[in-house]
Amino acid sequence: MQTLRAQVVSSTAAERLDALLLADREITATRIVDAPREVVFAMWTDPAHVGHWWGPNAFTNTIEEMDVRPGGVWRFVMHGPDGTDYKNRSVYDEVVTPERLVYSHVSGPTFRMTATFGAHGDQTRLVVRMRFDSAAQRDKVAGELGAVEGLGQTLDRLEAYVAGRTRG
């Protein structure tokens, strides 16, 4: 299930207003992944795993650097099915194992990604939020680059990869 909206989960009026104001700048997706959050978090932060599932369908990855700590850098190249290479660079802003990752994607297009890994019994409630500087930038990335579909496919690939790793 993917949405092009913000989820209001805060309790104060000011926080709710802030969430509503940000809604037009975000792409948000929520999934229930059939594995404990420690496993899902590890699959998201270990370069030995993330390169196998990251990105839309038919993309492959070369992970050049993945230093998962505040201030650490994640550099990788996504290889498109048409042979085009897409260089990516992100800087981790916040790492709370196994609950939350926040990083800034600093190679164009720029955005801030927040992934929360909530315990949901033996499963994980994963919420991924891409926050852009403006609604126009969000719309451009969604329209021209297919970011909504791409995020959905990325999470489909994560779910399939986790399922393949956790089946007894």
Image (spheres, rainbow, N blue to C red):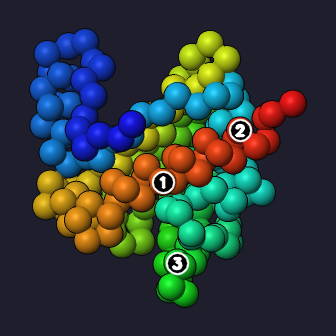
**Residue type indicated by callout 1:** Gln
Q: Secondary structure at mark 3?
A: loop
**Residue type indicated by callout 2:** Ala
Mark 3 closeness class: few <14, some 14–19, many ≥20 residues within 10 Å? some
- In the rendered view, does 8 fall on the left or right side of 92? left
**Picture quadrant where residue 95 is located:** top right
The residue indicated by pointer 2 is 163
Q: Secondary structure at mark 1?
A: helix
- Residue plotted at (29% across, 40% down): 3
User: Disc 2 versus disc 3: distance between alpha carbons?
Assistant: 24 Å
- Residue plotted at (48% across, 54% down): 153
The residue indicated by pointer 3 is 80
- Residue plotted at (18% across, 22% down): 16
In the image, residue 70 sits, relative to residue 88, either above or below, namely above
The residue indicated by pointer 1 is 153
User: Disc 3 versus disc 1: distance between alpha carbons?
Assistant: 14 Å
In the image, residue 78 sits, relative to residue 158, either above or below, namely below
**Residue type indicated by callout 3:** Gly
The x, y position of residue 148, in whole percent, is 33, 54
